[in-house]
Image (tube, helix red, strand yellow):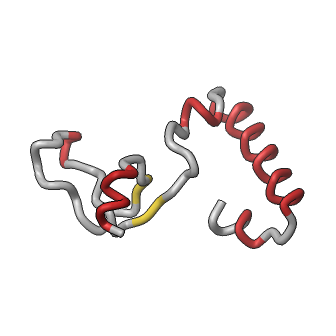
Protein backbone atom coordinates (compact mmCIF):
# COMPACT_ATOMS: atom_id res chain seq x y z
CA UNK A 1 0.00 0.00 0.00
CA UNK A 2 2.80 2.42 0.89
CA UNK A 3 4.62 1.73 -2.35
CA UNK A 4 1.69 1.99 -4.73
CA UNK A 5 -1.51 3.37 -3.17
CA UNK A 6 0.18 6.40 -1.60
CA UNK A 7 1.23 7.54 -5.07
CA UNK A 8 -2.32 7.62 -6.39
CA UNK A 9 -3.54 11.20 -6.53
CA UNK A 10 -7.32 10.87 -6.51
CA UNK A 11 -9.50 9.49 -3.74
CA UNK A 12 -11.38 7.46 -6.34
CA UNK A 13 -8.18 5.71 -7.46
CA UNK A 14 -7.19 5.03 -3.84
CA UNK A 15 -10.64 3.55 -3.16
CA UNK A 16 -10.38 1.43 -6.32
CA UNK A 17 -6.99 0.15 -5.12
CA UNK A 18 -8.59 -0.81 -1.77
CA UNK A 19 -11.29 -2.74 -3.61
CA UNK A 20 -8.77 -4.63 -5.74
CA UNK A 21 -6.58 -5.41 -2.72
CA UNK A 22 -9.48 -6.74 -0.65
CA UNK A 23 -10.74 -8.86 -3.55
CA UNK A 24 -7.28 -10.35 -4.08
CA UNK A 25 -6.91 -11.15 -0.37
CA UNK A 26 -10.25 -12.98 -0.51
CA UNK A 27 -9.43 -14.80 -3.77
CA UNK A 28 -5.83 -15.77 -3.06
CA UNK A 29 -5.85 -16.27 0.72
CA UNK A 30 -9.52 -17.18 1.29
CA UNK A 31 -9.75 -14.68 4.15
CA UNK A 32 -11.35 -11.29 4.46
CA UNK A 33 -9.27 -8.17 4.89
CA UNK A 34 -10.82 -7.59 8.33
CA UNK A 35 -9.79 -11.08 9.47
CA UNK A 36 -6.16 -10.37 8.59
CA UNK A 37 -5.88 -6.69 9.50
CA UNK A 38 -7.30 -6.34 12.99
CA UNK A 39 -6.09 -2.79 13.67
CA UNK A 40 -6.65 -0.10 11.07
CA UNK A 41 -5.21 1.87 9.48
CA UNK A 42 -2.52 -0.63 8.63
CA UNK A 43 0.80 0.75 9.89
CA UNK A 44 4.28 -0.77 9.70
CA UNK A 45 7.61 0.50 11.05
CA UNK A 46 10.82 -0.56 12.76
CA UNK A 47 11.02 2.15 15.43
CA UNK A 48 8.45 0.63 17.83
CA UNK A 49 9.42 -2.92 18.88
CA UNK A 50 6.33 -5.13 18.90
CA UNK A 51 7.78 -8.59 18.23
CA UNK A 52 9.03 -10.76 21.07
CA UNK A 53 11.33 -13.81 20.93
CA UNK A 54 9.12 -16.91 20.71
CA UNK A 55 6.07 -14.66 21.30
CA UNK A 56 7.03 -14.38 24.99
CA UNK A 57 6.12 -10.85 26.16
CA UNK A 58 8.12 -11.31 29.35
CA UNK A 59 11.29 -11.17 27.22
CA UNK A 60 12.76 -8.01 25.77
CA UNK A 61 11.16 -7.11 22.39
CA UNK A 62 13.23 -7.46 19.24
CA UNK A 63 14.50 -4.09 18.03
CA UNK A 64 14.85 -2.77 14.47
CA UNK A 65 12.40 -5.32 13.05
CA UNK A 66 10.00 -3.95 10.43
CA UNK A 67 6.61 -5.13 11.64
CA UNK A 68 2.94 -4.24 11.89
CA UNK A 69 2.18 -1.67 14.58
CA UNK A 70 -0.83 -3.16 16.32
CA UNK A 71 -0.06 -1.70 19.75
CA UNK A 72 -1.17 1.88 19.20
CA UNK A 73 -0.51 2.88 22.81
CA UNK A 74 3.17 1.90 22.41
CA UNK A 75 3.23 3.89 19.17
CA UNK A 76 1.78 6.96 20.91
CA UNK A 77 4.35 6.73 23.70
CA UNK A 78 7.23 6.36 21.25
CA UNK A 79 6.08 9.27 19.10
Quarter of the rendering containing residue 47: bottom left
Quarter of the rendering occupied by the C terminus: bottom left
With 43 as the anchor, is 48 left or right in this view?
Answer: left
The residue that appears at 30% across and 66% down in the rendered structure is 78
Q: Looking at the picture, does residue 56 appear above or below residue 45?
A: above
Image x and y of residue 37, in percent: 54, 40
Q: Residue furthest top?
A: 30
With 34 as the anchor, is 66 left or right in this view?
Answer: left
Quarter of the rendering containing residue 30: top right
Image x and y of residue 8, in percent: 80, 68
Image x and y of residue 76, in percent: 36, 60
Q: Nearer the viewer, residue 35 or 78?
A: 78
The residue that appears at 41% across and 47% down in the rendered structure is 70
Q: Nearer the viewer, residue 14 or 62?
A: 14
How many numbered discs, if any? 0
With 12 as the anchor, is 37 left or right in this view?
Answer: left
Amino acid sequence: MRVFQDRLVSLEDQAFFDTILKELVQTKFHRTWDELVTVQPLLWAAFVPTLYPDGDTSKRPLSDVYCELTNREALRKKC
